[in-house]
Structure formats: structure tokens, C-alpha cells
């Protein structure tokens, strides 16, 4: 079978920008030097591009995890053009197809099943998607979005103006045109490209799978640091419409923090998050699956199997009751007219179920430790 033709525009872009970043950027730095202002411009534009992709292209438009004010959408649309990763419409179409057919080597645009190189950059170098390249049937909702539609129609102009115009203007203001073009222009673009591409490639082969093993996606805190929170990819592939990727307070997810801050400022609303009981249940099911695999290595496997199933059933039931009680308690706090007796009853019921949940969780953890 013949290989698809090479896409020369993409190939030249990635090759020339990559070589410039590897050779010209360090050469100029060693011979002329970069100052703090140039590095600051590089960092600010890199962050602007990255956040526009994660908060705009990804969580807003691809997954509709929240709704954004038009002003915020325009900011993301301009930043997305600066990131030079195609229009929001095209990017979202590819990404929705990826989620629908994840790991399917024929239908997933950047399937990790075809190897690191293909999922990282190879899928953009040849016409692998000739039949679906301009098929936007899965993003009809975005075609009706005036911001997305405008950016798609004028994407090339916006991409050229932002990628050349912004570094050029900053260089003229600073007095070192070439240095700014290399650092805030080329290096920033290359870094933006590959940090995004790492989610398609590395985040499907490196990390843990605490929530599901039905696909290749992994959670990786190191990748999250460099990708504005996108590294918690195992969670994301199971709960794709959640505006968060890092669900714990300590997990690095600046995109989540930005969306939440925008909501406080009135620039975002209808933030979607998965019920906590579903998240806990998914984590529990994965723990049971791994524990059952270890049981086969035990001498008294039948006893361990029975213990596992018993503790799993107890904890699963406690999860349902505990989170239902907590939800009822939170709802009653909004009803100021609720009788004092009913309020105390709900609080007592919640505390009892919480204690039972914690005991069941502790017993489950001890059982898993005994299997290790």
C-alpha cells in the first residue's frame, strides 16, 4: 500500500522552525545574548498560546466544559492563531474524533497505537486524513459560533499577523529585532507546538491509569506542569466534559484555575464537573481490577477473592450513600427556611455516613496493602 503524500507546508514549517530553534536560537544567545525582557516576552507569549489552546480550543470548544463570554473567546481565538495549530474549528473536529475513536488506528487522527512518532507529529506530515480533513460534521455547533467561524475564515491572516507582527513589534520596542524574533517568535512557537503534541504522544504511553485502562491515556504530573494542567490525561479521557483535569487541590492545573477565576469575574459560567461519587467509583473499580490480578499469584486465592469482593461491595455502597447524603446537606444549607430539627437530622446522618465511608475506605486500603 502506497504511503500518503507528504504535506509540504507542515513539513517545512516544523523542519525549519525546529532547526532554527536548535541552531540559530542558541547561537544568537551565545554570541549576542538575550536579556530579561526578551525572556519575559518569550514566557508571556508561550503562556498565552498554551492557555488559549487548553482553556479555549480544548476545554471550551472541543468539550464544551463551560461557557465563556465573547470577550474571553476572542482572547482565546487570537492566542490560538498565535499558537499556530490550525483553526479552533479544525482543531476541535480532530480532537472530538480522537475522543470518539481513541486508539483506533484507522479512525483516531493521532492514535497512540501507531507509535510515538506518528501520534506526536507524524500524523500532520502526510495526508493520512484525506477523507476527513474538511469534514466538520462533528462540530456543527461551533460553525454557528461567530468567534470560531470568523477565526476559521481568516485563520491564515490571523496566524501571520500574530506570529510575525507581535514579535516584530516587541523587537522594535526593545531595540533587538532579531533576538526577539528568534526567542519570542520561533522558540516560543516550537515550544508551544511540542508541549501540546506531548499530550497526544507521551500522555498515552508514560504515566499511571488510576481511573480506567480501557484506553491508553495516562496521568502524568510532570507533563501537567509543562502543558498547563493537561497531563492528567487518564482522568480526562474518562470524564472529558469536566472543566478540570487535575481534580485534587494540589494538582497543577492552571487552566482550571483560570476558568474558575473567569467565572468569579463573570467571564465564564456553567462550569461542568463530574459528580465525585462517579470519580471515586471509577478509581475503586480500577483498584479492584488490579487487586484481582494480584490475587492469582496468592496461594489462598479464593479467600482473597472473597475478601476483595466483600470489601469492594461495602465501599461501593458507602460511596453512594455518603455522597448522596453530602449532596442533601449542601442543598439544605441553601434552604434557610428548613426546620432546625430536619437540619440537625441531615447533619447527623451525613456525619454517620462519612465515618462509615472513611472506615470502609481504610479497610479497603489495608486489604490492598496486604496483597502488595
Image (cartoon, helix red, strand yellow):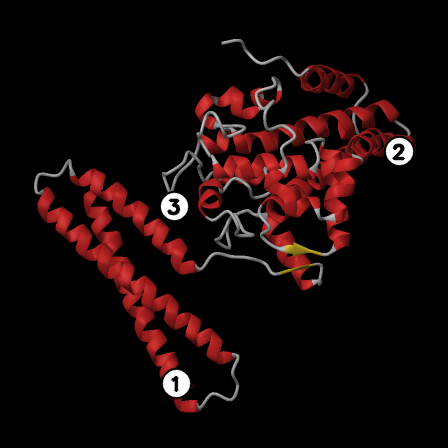
Q: Label 2 crowding class (10 Å Cα cut-off): few <14, some 14-19, many 20+? A: some
- The residue carrying mark 2 is 169
The CA distance from mark 2 to mark 1 is: 64 Å
Q: CB under 8 Å between callouts 3 and 1?
A: no
Please identify the residue farthest to the top as the structure is shown: 2
| Secondary structure state at the residue bearing disc 1 | helix
Q: Residue at x 22, y 38 (%)?
A: 293
Is there CB contact under 8 Å for labels 2 and 1?
Answer: no
Name the residue nearer the viewer: 151 or 274: 151
Residue that badge 3 annotates: 211
Residue 343, position as x, y percentages in the image:
42, 85
Q: Secondary structure beneath disc 3? A: loop
Is residue 32 visible in the rendered structure shown here? yes
First reached walking from the N terminus: tag 3 or tag 1: 3
Quarter residue 92 falls in? top right
Residue labelled with disc 1: 344
First-in-chain label (3 vs 2): 2
Q: Up-down: is 105 above or below 100?
A: above
Depicted 362 relative to depicted 353: above or below: above
- Viewed as shown, does residue 40 lie left or right of 368? right
Q: CA distance from mark 3 to mark 1?
A: 35 Å
Marks 3/2 in contact by CB < 8 Å: the verdict is no
Task: Work out whether 328 lies above or below 70.
Answer: below
Q: Choose mark 3 or mark 2, whichever is in front.
A: 3
Q: Of callouts 2 and 1, which one flags the residue occurring earlier in the amino acid sequence?
A: 2
Disc number at residue 71? none
Q: Position of residue 370 (x, y in %)?
A: 19, 47
Does residue 331 sit above or below 264 in this rendering? below
Q: Secondary structure at mark 2?
A: helix
Amino acid at each position: 500500500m502506497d504511503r500518503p503524500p507528504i504535506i509540504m507546508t507542515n513539513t517545512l514549517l516544523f523542519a525549519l522552525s525546529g532547526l532554527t530553534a536548535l541552531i540559530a536560537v542558541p547561537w544568537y544567545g551565545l554570541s549576542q545574548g538575550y536579556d530579561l525582557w526578551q525572556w519575559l516576552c518569550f514566557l508571556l507569549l508561550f503562556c498565552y498560546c498554551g492557555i488559549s489552546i487548553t482553556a479555549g480550543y480544548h476545554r471550551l470548544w472541543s468539550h464544551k466544559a463551560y461557557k465563556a463570554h465573547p470577550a474571553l473567546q476572542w482572547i482565546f481565538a487570537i492566542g490560538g492563531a498565535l499558537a499556530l495549530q490550525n483553526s479552533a474549528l479544525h482543531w476541535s473536529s480532530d480532537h472530538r474524533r480522537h475522543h470518539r475513536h481513541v486508539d483506533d488506528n484507522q479512525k483516531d487522527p493521532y492514535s497512540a497505537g501507531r507509535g510515538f512518532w506518528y501520534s506526536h507529529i507524524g500524523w500532520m506530515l502526510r495526508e493520512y486524513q484525506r477523507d476527513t480533513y474538511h469534514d466538520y460534521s462533528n462540530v456543527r455547533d461551533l460553525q454557528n459560533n461567530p468567534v470560531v467561524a470568523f477565526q476559521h475564515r481568516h485563520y491564515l491572516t490571523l496566524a501571520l499577523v500574530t506570529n510575525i507582527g507581535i514579535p516584530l513589534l516587541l523587537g522594535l520596542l526593545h531595540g533587538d529585532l532579531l533576538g526577539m524574533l528568534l526567542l519570542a517568535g520561533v522558540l516560543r512557537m516550537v515550544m508551544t507546538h511540542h508541549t501540546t503534541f506531548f499530550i497526544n504522544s507521551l500522555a498515552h504511553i508514560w504515566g499511571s491509569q488510576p481511573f480506567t485502562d480501557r484506553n491508553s491515556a495516562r496521568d502524568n504530573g510532570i507533563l501537567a506542569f509543562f502543558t498547563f494542567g493537561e497531563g492528567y490525561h487518564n482522568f480526562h479521557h474518562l470524564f472529558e466534559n469536566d472543566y478540570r483535569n487535575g481534580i485534587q487541590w494540589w494538582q497543577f492545573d492552571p487552566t482550571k484555575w483560570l476558568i474558575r477565576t473567569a467565572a468569579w469575574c463573570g467571564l465564564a459560567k456553567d462550569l461542568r464537573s463530574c459528580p465525585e461519587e462517579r470519580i471515586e467509583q471509577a478509581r475503586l473499580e480500577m483498584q479492584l481490577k488490579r487487586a484481582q490480578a494480584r490475587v492469582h499469584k496468592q496461594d489462598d486465592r479464593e479467600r482473597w477473592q472473597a475478601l476483595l469482593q466483600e470489601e469492594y461491595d461495602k465501599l461501593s455502597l458507602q460511596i453512594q450513600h455518603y455522597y448522596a447524603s453530602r449532596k442533601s446537606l449542601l442543598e439544605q444549607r441553601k434552604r434557610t427556611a428548613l426546620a432546625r430539627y430536619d437540619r440537625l437530622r441531615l447533619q447527623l446522618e451525613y456525619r454517620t455516613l462519612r465515618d462509615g465511608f472513611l472506615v470502609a475506605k481504610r479497610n479497603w486500603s489495608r486489604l490492598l496493602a496486604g496483597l502488595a
